[in-house]
Image: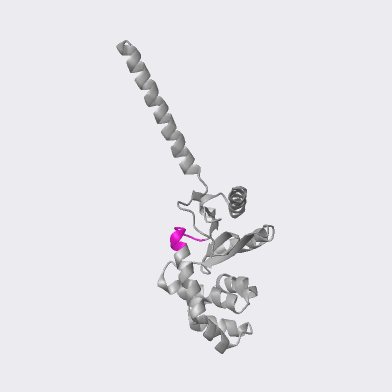
Amino acid sequence: MQLNQLLSRAFSILALSAAGLLAASASAQTQNYIELTPPQPSDTAGKVEVLEFFAYTCPHCKTMEPLVANWAKTLPDNVVVRPVPVAFNASMADLQRMYYTLESLDRLDLHNAFFRAIHDERKRLFDAKAMAAWAAEQGIDNQTFEGVFKSFGVNTKVSRANELAKAYKVEGTPTLAIGGRYVTSPSMNSSYEATITQAQALLDRVLKN
């Protein structure tokens, strides 16, 4: 083969390689979810889990919460949506305990009310004392609240929430984890609604497989 033919073929190979790299780069830039390796197991036996990582101090979480709640109503019986409170520093641990205390007391009807108290009413509910006072205003016995808030069960759930946030590499909220395999969030999509649409597509993929 003549030298000019060899050079022509070499340039063609380089051009194809460069095009492939550019296409891969463009794909990565437009990726609106992350695939986890390895996949994470479900904590709910026999169920596909959708984990909703949130923080009470996050205004985006407050906005996204009703969308997730409405979406959850459309999901099949073998899928469960589990909110997971996230703490990015030690000062947020009491906010995690607040969610699990409401859950343990069967008062998750106050979940959105607590969001509103922080963001709409501008109440500074960031420590155990302030949270207990707010809970009392909602009709929860103070002694009962404090006993659950500091309980072994709530502390165990907080520890597990921290493990999950680390395993799913959660760096911001809100974040949705789908079936232990995929993670998506508004920061990866064009809107809150687009995030739900993407989460549904990922869930469909998990259920199909």
Q: Is residue 173 visible?
A: yes
Magenta-colored segment: predominant secondary structure: loop
Quarter of the image with the N terminus is top left
Which of 46 and 102 lies nearest the eye of the viewer? Answer: 46
On screen, residue 16 versus residue 76, left or right, reads left
x, y percent for residue 131: 53, 80
Taking the magenta stretch, the answer to whether it contains residue 103 is: no
Q: Position of residue 49 (x, y in %)?
A: 58, 60
**Residue in front for this viewpoint, 81 or 61:** 81
Q: Residue at x 43, y 30 (%)?
A: 19
Task: Please state the extent of the stretch shown in magenta in the rendering.
Answer: 165-173
User: Residue 124 appears at what percent x and percent y?
Assistant: 51, 77
Q: Where is residue 15, by image quadrant?
A: top left
- Residue 100 vertical position relative to residue 51 in the rendered view, above or below: below
Q: Residue furthest left?
A: 3
Q: Is residue 171 visible?
A: no
* Residue furthest front as drawn: 46
Image check: 76 left or right of 54? right
Q: Position of residue 122 (x, y in %)?
A: 55, 74
Q: Vertical placement of 4 versus 115: above or below? A: above
Q: Quadrant of residue 112?
A: bottom right
